[in-house]
Amino acid sequence: MRRRDALKTLAPAFVPAAALGLQDNVAPSRRVTVGVIGTGNQGTGDMKNFLRDERVQVVAVCDVNKQSPGYWDGAVAGREPARNLVDWHYGREKRSGVYKGCAAYEDYRDVLRRTDIDAVLIALPDHWHSIPTIQAARAGKDIYGEKPLALTVAEGRAMADAVKDHKRIFQCGSQQRSDVRFRKACEIVRNGGIGKLHTVLCGLPGGTPDFGKTGDRQDPEPIPEGFNYDMWLGPAPDAPYAPGRCHVNFRWILDYSGGQITDWGGHHPDIAQWGMGTELSGPIAIRGGQATWAQEKLWNTATDFHFEAIYASGVRMVYSSRVRGGVTFLGSDGSVWVNRGAIEATPLSLLDYEPSEKEIRLYRSTNHTRNFIDCVLSRNPPVAPIEQAHRSITIAHLGNISLRLGRDLRWDPETEQVQNDTRANEMLSRPMRKPWKL
């Protein structure tokens, strides 16, 4: 019996919530215990959002790094700052003085072994998304997993299958789906507001910004005390430690990520798929690729890129660092552009559009983390489910493969294979360093 089910059965005889340091005004059957796996940049930000939800109790945090700088703008993060934040948040609200504190772990498997944890937040570097997600699903945990969903197409498929097989709730951290402007733009397009859709422009940032202020430290250095670097590498190839390799700047190294192409691949291209109605499918070809690659000692992802994803309907998705940032839908009778905090349309009257009950009305969510907790309790699908996240990030992976090989690809979204291209299909997955395996 799962912990929350037991609470439903035994609630009348259970000890008061205050004795556990939990919210007094939330019924035990409506409370969700959460373990946070990855307490760097995005993980700490997501954790703060969960702390604001009165139905949530964060009971454990986990990170291979105890505490260090090297995160956003050189900030300090790690499991100890995260634990301190959780303890301060709950401790200041508990007048009983019996709050026992948040547990902190170095190994994520210790979190998954805890039977009193309902859900986990997984906010790790991309190369560490698949294995913990699959193991969490097997352990009966619901999962809020950060974007991009996976490092490869094969890992994404394995993750989606595991979540489905074990009947878990999975919310991808593609939070633009919980933004009213993005939803409005997609509803306008889905209901024919701009006529026949023919082109979608996805404008993504380029470059390799030095987010962690460690770009000048790409040569090998001694591993800092309190950092389990071998565990950080995990399934990635063995490599010497350097500050410019880890924490927030990992995304500029192809062994761990795909650069801006995948870092933003869970955002604007995901919205494009939502507006096109192809969120459970994908393109049939990738063509016209052009890219410039970073020439740093460690950083090697694309700094400038452009390619097109072609769909069976004839619609072109332009995936580029050379077009206006955001998502632009172009149709025979008008256009819609949307970005974070702004939306524009031609004709302007489209901005007054609201779909009728008989038209397509997309999933309504205004708070991404609360939507996840809603679905953990209701068992209904969330606004950014894993299968759709997998389909969206696949476009990014195919684009990177096409750019690296220097040739167009023909893609079968049903079989998830590149047609007549052995090398491209080999790049849909990657070998893992022992003892790790998918």
Image (cartoon, rainbow, N blue to C red):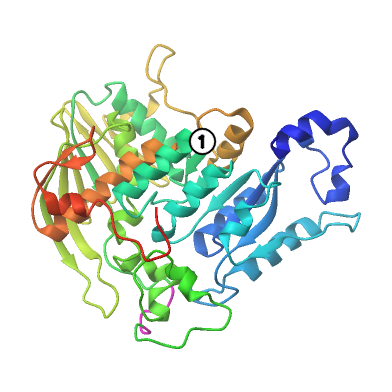
x 16%, y 36%: residue: 284
**Closer-to-camera residue (88/144):** 144
**Closer-to-camera residue (324/50):** 50
Query: Among all residues in the image, which is located at the extreme front?
Result: 435
Q: Amino acid at mark 1?
A: His
Identify the image quadrant of residue 39.
bottom right
**Closer-to-camera residue (429/400):** 429
Q: Which residue is mark 1?
A: 166
Q: Is residue 179 magenta?
A: no
Residue bounds of the magenta highlight: 212-217
**In the rendering, at what x and y percent does residue 332 appear?**
16, 27
- Tag 1's secondary structure? loop
394 in relation to 295, above or below:
above
Residue 330 horizontal side relative to residue 339, left or right: left
**In the rendering, at what x and y percent does residue 55 appear?**
71, 41
**Closer-to-camera residue (203/77):** 77
x 55%, y 72%: residue: 65
Residue 287 horizontal side relative to residue 16, left or right: left
420 in relation to 248, above or below:
above
x 42%, y 88%: residue: 221
Residue 338 in sight: no
Q: Main secondary structure of the magenta part?
A: loop
**In the rendering, at what x and y percent does residue 104 appear?**
67, 64
Identify the image quadrant of residue 336.
top left
Query: Which quarter shows the N terminus?
Result: top right
